[in-house]
Amino acid sequence: MTVLRKVEQYLRRTEMPETKFGRLAVRDPRLVRDLRNGREPRPPMVARIEAFIAAGQNGDAR
């Protein structure tokens, strides 16, 4: 499964805005838009995104 697909599923499940996800996960509010437009993140960024999703963070505590 691609990282974009994982992000899209997470966004649907949590109803989190895409810019908030990018800011919280990797400090880049344009992340999701860029991924949708073909951006290919490097392995360290993919790891950060997957770790954020795995932790189940929803941004309420930040």
Image (spheres, rainbow, N blue to C red):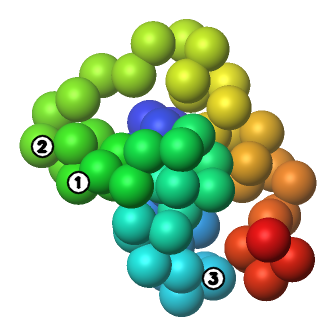
Say which element carries label 3. helix
Q: Quadrant of the C terminus?
A: bottom right
> What residue is disc 1 on?
33
> What residue is disc 3 on?
14
Please state which amino acid type lies under the numbered disc 2. Answer: Asn
For the image shown, how many numbered marks are present on the structure?
Answer: 3
Tell whether 54 sits left or right of 36.
right
Say which element carries label 1. helix
Q: CA distance from mark 3 to mark 2?
A: 22 Å
Q: Are marks 1 and 2 in contact (CB under 8 Å)?
A: yes
- The label number, if any, that marks residue 4 in the structure image: none
Label 3 vs label 1, nearer the camera: 1
> What residue is disc 2 on?
37
Tell whether 47 sits left or right of 33.
right
Q: Depth check: 24 or 39 in front?
A: 24
Q: Earlier in the sequence, mark 3 or mark 2?
A: 3
Residue with the most extreme left position:
37
Q: Depth check: 61 or 44 in front?
A: 61
